[in-house]
Image: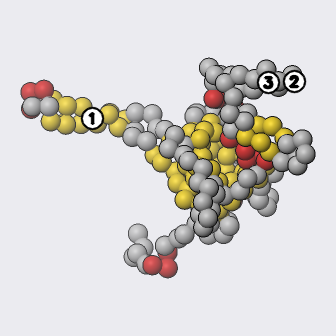
Amino acid sequence: MAIGSVTNFIKISGRIAHTPTDFLAAFPHGGTAMGEIREGGLAFNPEFEALTAEEYGGTTVDFVQRGPSASFGAVLREFDADALAAIFPNIATGAASGRPIVRGRVFDTTTGSTPVQPGALASDRAVSLVVSPRATDEHPAIYIPNAIPLLDEAATMQINIGIEVGFAVLFHAIPNSDGRLYDIGLLEDLTV
């Protein structure tokens, strides 16, 4: 192992895209760009279950490996139509501006409108997701082949002078048909 050096520390500036097809192609890698992000991170959920021994007063004596799970959270910095359509279940297009409208609906009686109803499975809207760094030959990327787009439960849309507006989004990794949850590495080493 090499000796640690501050020159090896990295700060990754990145953006996200869904349904990438070619990691060797320029961003959005054959997919759909969703925009710039800030405060992003891949959270690894606990993969071990503690085994305790009653005869030792409930002391932990071992751990059992569980299946891994992870989720990627970030603040989306742009009011991008493609990003909003992937994240929010109900989006419309403004008749006058042609820009997206995020619609909170329990049900909708508007003619021609078919909102996602309560009780629908979020996995029906799953996408493949790539978190692509700007320095693709130096910084690692994150690829989640089957990600459920969600709003962060603690999300608030800040509207205030001097504060950048953003949507706190969460992509929960679920296994794809090959059992993959995520890959982290240089884009040139990853496969779709």
Left or right: where 48 falls relative to 121: left
User: Would you call the spot at circle 3 few (<14 residues within 10 Å), some (14-19), or many (20 or more)?
Assistant: few
Q: Earlier in the sequence, mark 3 or mark 1?
A: 1
Left or right: where 57 falls relative to 142: left
Q: Amino acid at mark 1?
A: Ala
Residue 169 vs residue 93, the one in the foreground: 93
Q: Which mark is residue 114?
A: 3
Q: Amino acid at mark 3?
A: Thr
Q: Nearer the viewer, mark 2 or mark 1?
A: 2
Q: Which residue is mark 2?
A: 112
User: Would you call the spot at circle 2 few (<14 residues within 10 Å), some (14-19), or many (20 or more)?
Assistant: few
Task: Tell me what residue is drawn at x 68 percent, y 33 percent.
Answer: 104
Instruction: For mark 2, give the secondary structure.
Output: loop
User: Would you call the spot at circle 1 few (<14 residues within 10 Å), some (14-19), or many (20 or more)?
Assistant: few
Instruction: For mark 3, give the secondary structure.
Output: loop
Where 111 falls versus 27 (above or below)? above
Q: Quadrant of residue 145?
A: top right
Q: Amino acid at mark 2?
A: Gly
The C terminus sits in image quarter: top right
What percent of the width, then of the height, locates residue 13? 62, 66
What percent of the width, then of the height, locates residue 69? 49, 38
Q: Nearer the viewer, mark 3 or mark 1?
A: 3
- Mark yes or no: residue 119 visible: yes
Q: Which residue is mark 1?
A: 50
User: Gap in Å between the C-alphas at discs 3 and 2?
Assistant: 7 Å
- Mark yes or no: residue 85 visible: no
Left or right: where 92 falls relative to 143: right
Q: Earlier in the sequence, mark 2 or mark 1?
A: 1
User: Gap in Å between the C-alphas at discs 2 and 1?
Assistant: 52 Å
What percent of the width, then of the height, locates residue 8? 49, 75
The N terminus sits in image quarter: bottom left
Residue contact at pointers 3 and 2, CB within 8 angstroms: yes
